[in-house]
Image: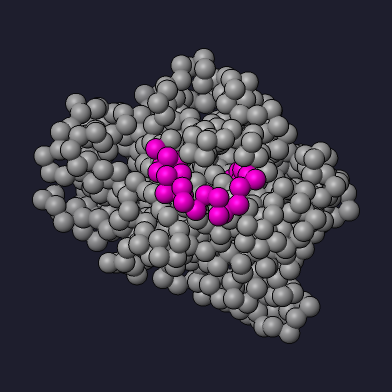
Amino acid sequence: MNRSGARHEILAHTADVGLRVEAPELRSLFSEAAAALAELAADVPAGARELPPERVELEAPDLVGLAYEWLNELIGLADVRRAALAGAQVERLEQVPPPSDPGDEATWTWCLDGTIRLARFEDGDVRPRVGVKSATYHDLRVEPSEGGWTLTAYLDV
Amino acid sequence: MARAAHGSRAPAVSSGVGARAAPSAGPPLQIERIDPYRWRIARDERRGMRVEGIVYADDRLMCTLRDDPALQQVANVATLPGIVGASLAMPDVHWGYGFPVGGVAATELEGGVVSPGGIGFDINCGVRIIRSDLVVEEIRAVLPRLADALFAAVPSGVGARAGHRLRRDELDEVLRDGSRWAVSRGLGWADDLERTEEHGRLAGADPSAVSARAHERGADQLGTLGSGNHFLEIEVVDEIGDAVAAEAFGLRLGQVVVSIHCGSRGLGHQVCTDHVAVMDRTMGRSGIHVPDRQLACAPLGSAEARAYLGAMAAASNFAWANRQLIAHHVRGVFERVLGRSAEQLGMRLVYDLSHNIAKLERHQVSGRAVDVCVHRKGATRAFPAGHPDVPEVYRSIGQPVFVPGDMGRYSYVAVGAPGAMEQTFGSTCHGAGRNLSRHAALRELRGVSIADQLERAGILVRAERYDLLAEEASLAYKDVATVIEVAEGAGLVRRVARLRPLAVVKG
C-alpha cells in the first residue's frame, strides 16, 4: 500500500495477466493502476534516469471506457518512446457535462488529465519484463468498494 | 440440470467455474458429450445464444477445461449477431478475452458482424516453417553458433527494434503489399509467396484506417520477433505420420527445419485497441448488446466494419512481411555459418499460415452455400485437398497445418482434412494451449534453471530474459500430442510429421 492508501495485486489468467487495484478515490485508483502496469511490464530501479514527463488528456463516455483508454495510453506511449513505464500521476478525473444539454447525466463525459513518467531501456538496469500488447475490455471493471474504489483489468501479453 | 448425451452414455458435466472464473461468468455451464472428441453447449444454456457451442476435446482435455472460463466465452461468442453454425472451440482452447483462445466463429455477411476481439490484438500472428536438405548430424557441431547468430540477427524481446526505421510512405507500402514488399526487394524468394496463405498479401488493406500511433509503433519493428510465446526454433523431423504428405511438403526423417512464430507487433496491437474502442462506442447505435465489451463489434458493411477490415488487412500484411524478413535473416545466418547458399541448403519455405485473422469465405451451412466472415482467434485454416485456396503445389494433398507445442517437447505438421470443411469452417487448433498462468509457472518453477534443464535434454536456448523462461516452460502447456490427437480424431487434420526442438530463440 502506498501513502495515498492505494494498493494493487497481479491476477492469474491462463494465457494473459490481470490487475486488481484499490484506492480511496478515483484519481489515486488510476495512478495506482499505472504503478501496477509499470511493475508488471518492466524492472525500473529507483533512481533510474527518466525522460521528460508527458502530459495526456483523455476522455470516454464511462469510467470503464476511461480505464481502457488510460491503460492503453500508458502501453502505447511507452512502446512509441521505446521506454519503460516508470509511473504516472492523475491530476484530474471528473465527469463533465456537454455544453448543449447538461441536464442528462448519461451524456456527460469522463475526463482525465495525467502525467506519465518513462525510463529509457538503454539506461542502466531498466529492463523489460512482460510485453503487454493491450489492456482489454474483458471483465474490465471500475466500481465502488468498501473504503473507496476497485479497478480490475485483464491485459493481453 | 442433466442433459441427454448424444452418441454417448457420458453424463453432462458442469464447468464448475471457480477460482479462475471471470466474476461475470454466471452459474456453471452444462456441457454434454457428443462423441469422444466433441462436446456441446446447448443454445438455451445462456440467454442470448443464437447457436450452440461445440468444444473439441477428449476426456483428458475436458478435465482441464471444466474450471476454465473459456467455456463461458464460447457461450458468449454464440450471442454475436449473424453467427451461423456454432460457436466453435478448437482442442487447444483456453481462457482468452472476449473470444476464447482457440475460438472460431463465422458470421453471415448479410446481417452479421465483425468483432476485432475475435481476431485478437496480435493480428495475423502465425507460423512459417522453412525446410532444408540438412540432416541433424551436419549441424550438431555448429548448433551453438547457429543459435547465437540467429539470436543476434533477429531482434527479440519486449520492444525489440529493427535496425532500419521505415518512412511513412515505405510503411504504407508494407501495409498494402505484405510479403510481396519484401520479396520485391530481394528479401525472399518468389516461391515464398506461392507457399504463403493469401500469397502473403490480404486484399483490401487500407493504411489510412491505421492510426498514427499504430504507424509509429510499427515503423521500426519490421523483422523483429517480439516477446511472450513467440519463438524461432531449429528443429529436427523425428517422426513421419503421413509419408505421402510429408514428401509433398519436402519433409523427411532426421531433417533440419526452422520454425518462426510471430505477428504484427505493436502496429497490430494498436489497430485492435483502436477499433475495439470505436466499436464499443458505436455498437449501441446498431442495437447490438454483447455480454463482454471485448466482443465489441460492428455490422459487416458498416463504416466501422469496413475501416476495421481495411486496417486488419494492413496489419496482416505487416505480419507477413515481418515473418518474410525474419526468414531472410534465418537463411542468411545458415549461409554464413555453413558456408553454402540457402539455395544449396534447400531452405525452401514449406508454408506460412495465420492463426489470428478474419477471412471472407464461402462455406456450406445447413446445406446452403453462405458467404461468411470467419473469425479465427488462435485457430488455423485447415483446408483439405482440392480446395482452390490451397497452393497449387499442395492442392492434391491439402494445406499444411503447423501446430507448435512447447519448447521442451515437440510440435506437429499436419494437413487439412475434409472434416474441417464439414464441421469447423475449415479450421483447426493452432498450438498446445496453456495449462498454467505465467505467474503459476514462475511459482512452480522457482529456483529451476529452465535453460540448464533444456540444455541437458539437448536443446539450446537463447533469450533476452533467462529468469522469465519458466513462463514458457513445458509445464505451462498442455501436451500438444493430446491436442493433435483430438483434431485428428475429429477428422479436422491428419498428422504428417513431428518436430523436436534443437535450439530455441525466445523473446
Residue that lies at the very extreme toward the right in this rendered image: B367
Residue at 31% across, 66% down: B448
Q: In this view, does B75 lie to the left or right of B158?
A: right
User: In the picture provided, is A83 more to the left or to the right than B165?
Assistant: left
Q: Give the range drawn in magenta.
A: B127-152
- For residue B395, above or below residue B315: below
Q: Position of residue B206 (x, y in %)?
A: 60, 23
Tell me which corner region of the image, top left, top right, bottom left or bottom right, holds residue B46. Answer: bottom right
**Height in image: B96 above or below B390?**
below
Q: Residue at x 44, y 65 (%)?
A: B457
Q: In which quarter of the image is residue A139?
A: bottom left
**Can the viewer see residue B194 in this picture?**
yes
Is residue B130 highlighted in magenta? yes
Tell me what residue is drawn at x 64 percent, y 69 percent: B57
Q: In which quarter of the image is residue B404?
A: bottom right
Q: Is residue B186 magenta?
A: no
Between B471 and B455, the one nearer to me in the picture: B455
Q: Nearer the viewer, residue A157 or B290?
A: A157
Q: Nearer the viewer, residue B167 or B89?
A: B167
Residue B361 or residue B246, whichever sits in front? B246
